[in-house]
Image (tube, rainbow, N blue to C red):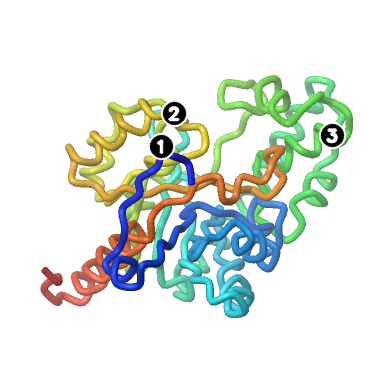
Amino acid sequence: MNPALPAGQSSKERKSGVKKFADLHVHTFHSDGTFTPEEVVKVAHKKGLSAIAITDHDSVDGITPSMAAAEKYGMEIIPGVELTAEEENLEIHILGYFIDWKAEWFEDKLKKIRQARLGRIYAMVDKLKSAGVDIDAEKVFKVSGPGAVGRLHLAIALYNEGITASINEAFRKYIGNESPHYVRKYKLTPKEAVDMIIKLGGVPVLAHPRVLGRDDLIARFVEDGIRGIEVYRTEHVPNVMTRYEEMASQHGLLITGGSDCHGTGKGEVLLGKVKVPYSFVEALKKEADNIKMQNENIPPAR
């Protein structure tokens, strides 16, 4: 376990004497990860994790097969999702934990978002071709496979074609937020994303705040109903984690953490590099139970 990460134990752990750890931010090939759900579970087991959250971008298709694979290892799968919102021309990623991923209205919404993702890739490919960068959209879709296609798939395709020397260069030179070839995603406000997750009985959490780089917006997201913040990540050095711990305390937010593993999509397998105590999972469960009771107009548990 990373020594900079918390070492708190849950009540169950104290009774059993066994420490359990979780990774609360994991992608499969149903979005922009490279691992199948079965591969994700197998790697997580090897890394000594007791629970993982499947949080694919705009997709819940990886949850059920992950749960089936996890039965072999007695591992817990937390049903989740990662929604992309937009505020002040910035991408804001909102994680949802313990959602009702089988809700039909939500799947209908995700289908619309994924359809918009296809259009976005075609638009960026057209912009790249206009600038003399010869890349075919079908090569991007071959990379994405069954997943919700995104910029990482386009970056991998650019790298595979020898157009860039690395995936990072593809973002930096061609498809980063400030690039003229960048095309915005499906328009979803942070409030809309938070409301959707709460309607699903889930817990909305702000993902990778340091990547966002706008700590001044966090208070606004709290007003929108955000319930937690992702403090522990592979790229967060101790002083960054301390800053977000303090912000969580200031705003009464839950603390979460995860590797944001995309299989080999980011150059290395990050799964297991961030292990948070199982007590974090218990806190999310309690909050999800309260949200579900509030949705049913039942007084929250104390």
For label 3, the residue is 135
Residue that appears at 51% across and 61% down: 52
Above or below — where is 295 with respect to 30? below
Q: Check disc 3 and give the amino acid type.
A: Ile
Disc 1/disc 2 C-alpha distance (Å) = 8 Å
Relative image position of residue 64 (x, y in whole percent): 58, 75
Q: Check disc 2 and give the amino acid type.
A: Val
Between tags 1 and 2, which lies in front?
1
Q: Are marks 1 and 2 in contact (CB under 8 Å)?
A: yes
Query: Position of 219 compared to 27: left or right?
Result: left
In what element is the residue under mark 2?
A: loop
Q: Nearer the viewer, residue 195 or 247?
A: 247
For label 2, the residue is 237
10 Å neighbourhood of mark 1: few (<14), some, or many (≥20)? some
Query: Position of 98 compared to 300: left or right?
Result: right
Between tags 2 and 3, which lies in front?
2
Query: Position of 294 compared to 187: left or right?
Result: left
Residue that appears at 55% across and 54% down: 26
10 Å neighbourhood of mark 3: few (<14), some, or many (≥20)? some
Residue that appears at 71% across and 38% down: 267
Q: Nearer the viewer, residue 186 or 277?
A: 277
Whichever of callouts 3 and 1 sits on the residue coming sooner in the sequence is 1
Whichever of callouts 2 and 3 sits on the residue coming sooner in the sequence is 3
Disc 3/disc 1 C-alpha distance (Å) = 42 Å
Whichever of callouts 1 and 2 sits on the residue coming sooner in the sequence is 1
Residue that appears at 72% across and 27% down: 170
Relative image position of residue 288 (x, y in whole percent): 29, 66
10 Å neighbourhood of mark 2: few (<14), some, or many (≥20)? few
Q: Check disc 1 and give the amino acid type.
A: Ala
For label 1, the residue is 4
